[in-house]
Amino acid sequence: MLKKQIVLGICLLGLVTSSKAITPFNIIRPFDPNFFPTYWKNQTRQFTPILSFGASNPHGRSVEGDTVNVLQVLFPTQDALAMLKGFAPTSQQAQLGQLININGDDGVRGHFKVTGDLKVLFSGSLIGRWNWENGVWLGMALPLASLKVKNVSWVDQTKNATLDDALTHQYLTDNFAANVAQLGNGLSIGDWSKAGVGDFTTYVGWRKSFLQEKKWLKEAIVNVRLGVQFPTGVRKDEDVAVSLAFGNDGAYTVPFAAGLDLRFRKIFWAGIDLTFMKMFNHIRDRRIQTNATQTDLLALQKTRARKEYGLTQMFNLYAEPIIGKGLSVRFAYEHFKHGDDKIAVMSNDYSTLAANTAAILNEWTTHDILIQLKYDSAHQKAENNRFRPQLSIFGKMPFNGKSSYQVSLIGASATFSF
Amino acid sequence: MVHKLTRLVLIFFALLVSSCGHATITLQANGATRAITFSGNNVSAHIADSNDMSSSLYLGRNDPTIVAGTNDGLAQYAISQAREGLGFILPCAPTTVRLNGLEKQPNPLSGQKIAVLGLFSGAYGTKNPFAVTQDSPQNLYWNVSTSGLDPFDVFSVTNIADANGAVTSGVVAATGASIFEVTSTTQIRGNFIFAAVKPNGAVFGAAGSGIAMIGQNGNSLAQAAAIVGDGVEKSVPLDGTQSYVKIVTNATVQQTTPDVYFDPITQRVYSAFTVATAAGAGDGARGIVMGYFNPITIIPNTVLSKLVLTDFAPATAYAGLVATAVGGLVSAGGVVTGTYSKFCSMYTSTGLTYGAIVGSNGATPANQTVSAVPTINKSVDPTNTTWPTDPTQGAMASKIVNPGTNLKTFFNSQFPLYYPYMGRGFQVPATTPADMPLFTDDAVKVGGGIAPGVIRDIQVNKDTVFVAVDAGAANAAGVFASQALFDGSAAIKGWTPWQRVATPTTTGNTIYGIGYQPQVGRLFTMEGATANTIDTVLTTTWNTADNDGLLGGTTTNAQVGFVELIDTQFSEGQGGIQAAFDFPNNTLGFAAAPNRLSAMIFTGYKQVVIAQTGADTGGGIFTPTVGDFSTNMQISTNGAVTAPGAGALILSITGGALDTIGAITSAAVVRDNVIGNVGYFVVGGVGGLAVLKPGWPVVGLQKNFANLPASAFTLIGSYKNVRKIWSDDTNFYVLTNDTFDRIPATQLAGATLTPVTLATPAILPQQYGQFSDVAVSAKVALLATSQGLFRTGDGANASTAVSPAAMAWTAVTLPESQVAVTRLQPLSTTGLPEGFSKNPVGGTVYVLAGSVNYDLASLYRIAVASTEAVAVTAATVQVIPDYFVQGTTSAFAALGAYRNYATTFGALVTASESSPDGSSPIFEALPPILRTGVFIAQNRNVQIQAGISIAITIGNLLRNSGIGSLILPTNTGMRVLE
């Protein structure tokens, strides 16, 4: 009994909200407000699976916002000379850097043009929701995904004109993967794939409808949510350079949000939703940057480090014309912005200052348009009918952003009430 | 308004000029052609303001005075100014001025022939020229205003009094001085002009001659009384009768070329002159006197003060030395003469003060002899409060260095937490013959011997002495420089030989005056066909030198120039010129006079270019090779050269064995010391070593490569990744990233090499180490590695050791370094890099400790003793101590970031980095204030505008010993300072 109460108590700590992983990717997050089921009286339990697929190969948005390969989001080339910097002067990395680079970087020596294909085999969520009469509800969500980065290609830009070029080829780039693995304590620069769960999330929320007697405005629904995300998701594999985290990479997270939905006669809905996510500091072994000039995929040093996360903001704005009899089309604009992260190295062996120069810690954003065809069978079935599913198919198209991965998605969701 | 418009137009054209790729720029005034500065306004008197931020050379008209009222536009150039960064000459003698506060007065300097020129800052802080005219030599005029100001103030003093109080017959030399002597108990401050004056009705040296002290008095200048309280303005006497001149019996000061000089570091005035002793044995004289400033009352009520002349070196110190000691002489019977014409102070990068004196006692030509003598500096002792009036401050110091007693380093105990460095100075005056610097001392002989010609001008900046000389017995006219070499206590122990740094742009011209520009190492020069026809004022600049008549081709065709012809041999996409090497005319293996040559080798990807940079004329005068280099230029694509055609200057070689080598990193001239001067060009790089065979004959390589037979580069040995080839005596050395070998030079004649390995990474204390640079001289090898600097161990000998163990490699600790050492720059008395442990004094090696890993670099210097005749000991290699705080030896310069190269020329220190992280390359001059104990922020470095923004790689900066230009190789071709 006590155990049930504790579980319930934890669950009640959260208000249902959207949830997202820290990975700078525009995939559908669990409890995306665009996928909130409609609540009908007596529908105390609702179950919503969401499933989406990549409609195209994801691309990247660079720091400047240009469309680039997903492995060139932060840097057009990866710098193998820079990766050797910042180590103890007599370390193997430092001594190798001294061997091949005393004349300095010429802009291409030791640089690799890296490309790869990011595939979203599927991503989705399983969401359960319990509603009470007073507008309070409890939700739980378990994201699922299968991603892969394949055809990773490292093309050496090093010329063959100087002694340093020759030494760079001989001692580093001609056998690059093996050298990186050896210098980076097992760091792989090859393909990666993973299927698994994301961060299990609970929410508590409160919603209330206020009927209006205005000429156009007939109903306003307000909601607030608070939740907890548990770090159950697949974490970034620190030994695979191109790997991604499915969740918040081990950090507990508290999302809090509020939304307002307005119905204008029986013509259309419109709404706005704001979500903020506070991710708590998290200590784990991470690959860190040991020099300001290093690039994101070639971080040789793995060490204990605490990550302090920037605030994540999600902004959702929609308009949803009602076609009739439970059929509607939603046009939504979604914007994600994740603030600068910080990192603190938990030893004196490496510089926290250098670690914090990593571009991967910098702010990222996405902008998407979502078009969703929705059907709610409750409009056509009796109120006491227990089987009144809500269905939707959708397409999501990124159109802007920076320092992020972006994919066009198609998918479907269904909500079953019990 | 018109004047301002004119200036704007001039500035516009100056900018045009400076962006046209010229190197040496003829500064424009009213020259009839662009090749000359002036028409009808020859100049002679000049004074350089070598300012750390913006230098100037002020010029005085030498043509006869223009008749008043003549409006020919020239009168305003009676005094003119060449200012750093401008392509034209600024006139500094407007027709109408505010004279002594009176508006719209005729300028007494306008159109005048100028006899004496100096610089004075007065109470206003801005240093401007003062002048004495040929027509009114008893007066002195000071331009209070800077060129272009209106109203333009001029202050004057008229009828300067001689030592007897009568009006002088003329000022013969003068200098401005800013007195700033501050201790914890006293302050002596003021601005004065010290002028050497003739007596009334007689020549300088006669009774009544003296030094006048002139200061600002409201809106004019005024002479101070020599004897306070007598109420009569007069000069401090300087003839042969004073105790600070004569030894025993009155001497005779002669009228020839006296000089007055103020040293801002020691705060002392010096005068140099020619002096004859009396005839008796034991009678002597001194040709240098020193003066200090004696206040009568102390601030805040200092109103009266006087100049006190005193001994530069006491008479007792010369006892028995006859003519061997600098600055004076003693007769052994009969009249003997010491001829001294210039005194310049020297403030070395190690923080010590010296006097550079032009003159001699007759054993060497007085007008070709430059001697450096230590001077006392007690102002660096924070506990010393009496130095301002101490007669030994600024005097000649004992040459016995005796660290801790004579040469002392001071730290400020008022800050006991870290005791900051205050300065360094000699403290013991020369009082006995044993203390006296002798003309024959290595530490004294600037240039290692007499200058290449009669000295027309001298300037000293930090560690370098520059002289402008006439053509001499073995060298054409030009500007030459010598750089100080330091011992392990930071004192000067010797000098590099005179090396050319500038050449007249017109054949037959001589450079009569110079002005060094410390900020980026440029040089103003004044040249003319004769001393009375100096009509061209130039400045060296960093660029490609197009059409400058030197390395930039002829004045009409840049395509035939050294720069253009060599640049076009290298492909920018393949790294362009990756390295350059200079071989002066005393390179072992080169021919002797009258067939001497100097040469440079440029290397790149599968490419070698060999170029002559200087050669003997038919009369044996070594002369820079300039202008058209295209004569019989040979371009080979098969790795071989045919016998060069007559007058050939450039050999360009690709193909053959060079294709195997790929990127060529190093080149050397190796002499087969067994068979006279038989020698070879040897190059090395990624793919190994190649030698140009069969080499040249026993007489050595002659000018125009005249006796170089048909030859081909031939692969030798089995090396890979050669970083350096080094030649020393009978051996040459090969350094790769993981081996250091010695090979007898005689093996170059054969087909195989039998090297002796002297080092592998196993000598290093930890794993993964490798080598980056090496220098070898006599028994000493210095090995730069990724794990520090190593030297030949005590008792070992690099020229005979048979194994790494036999070398007993010993780490040289570089305090506060970043472990790895990347570059070595040896300096020696021979001018050859392999001379740094030879001759009696050895040399100095500048060491760049650079950590790619930490993106840091520091420049150190080490003193290396000669090991030609003695074994290597713990004292052979010493890190020259540089300090910021007491007890911690530091680097000479922390560069603030990683740099590929750091190069010193004594006065100029540069650092460079190839395109860091893909951005524009860095080529910077370290601040001129850089000295021991001077912290330099990286943002104080000055980016040298050498047109390299589109370059990616920068190679090693070096001097072309033939013409004196600095050469900076890049992947987009070379840039030059000339």
Image (tube, rainbow, N blue to C red):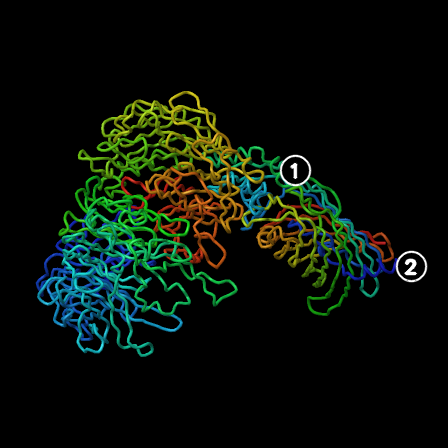
Tell me the SS state at disc 1: loop
Q: Position of residue B885 (x, y in %)?
A: 48, 59
The answer to whether any part of residue B136 appears in the image is: yes
Is residue B565 positioned above or below B110 on the image?
above
Q: Is residue B668 left or right of residue B292?
A: right
Report the number of discs.
Answer: 2
Q: Position of residue B866 (x, y in %)?
A: 38, 41
Q: Which mark is on residue A362?
A: none
Tell me the residue that label 1 is attached to.
Answer: A191
Is residue A129 positioned above or below B729 on the image?
below
Q: Position of residue B796 (x, y in %)?
A: 47, 36
Marks 1/2: CA distance?
A: 48 Å
In depth, the one of A43 and B788 nearer the eye is: B788
Write the residue at 29% across / 31% down: B590
The answer to whether any part of residue B34 appears in the image is: no
Chain where mark 2 sits: A
Q: Which mark is on residue A1?
A: 2
The N terminus of chain B - image quarter:
bottom left
In depth, the one of B732 and A370 nearer the eye is: B732
- Crowd tier of the residue under label 2, counting other residues whose Cα lies within 10 Å: few below 14, some 14–19, many 20 or above: few
Tell me the SS state at disc 2: loop
Of labels 1 and 2, earlier in sequence is 2
- Amino acid under label 2? Met
- Amino acid under label 1? Asp
In depth, the one of B691 and B296 nearer the eye is: B296
- Crowd tier of the residue under label 1, counting other residues whose Cα lies within 10 Å: few below 14, some 14–19, many 20 or above: some
Is residue B579 positioned above or below B334 on the image?
above
Q: Are marks 1 and 2 on the same chain?
A: yes
Tag 1 near tag 2, CB within 8 Å:
no
The residue lying furthest to the front in this view is: B281
In depth, the one of B439 and B890 nearer the eye is: B439
Q: Quadrant of residue A150?
A: top right
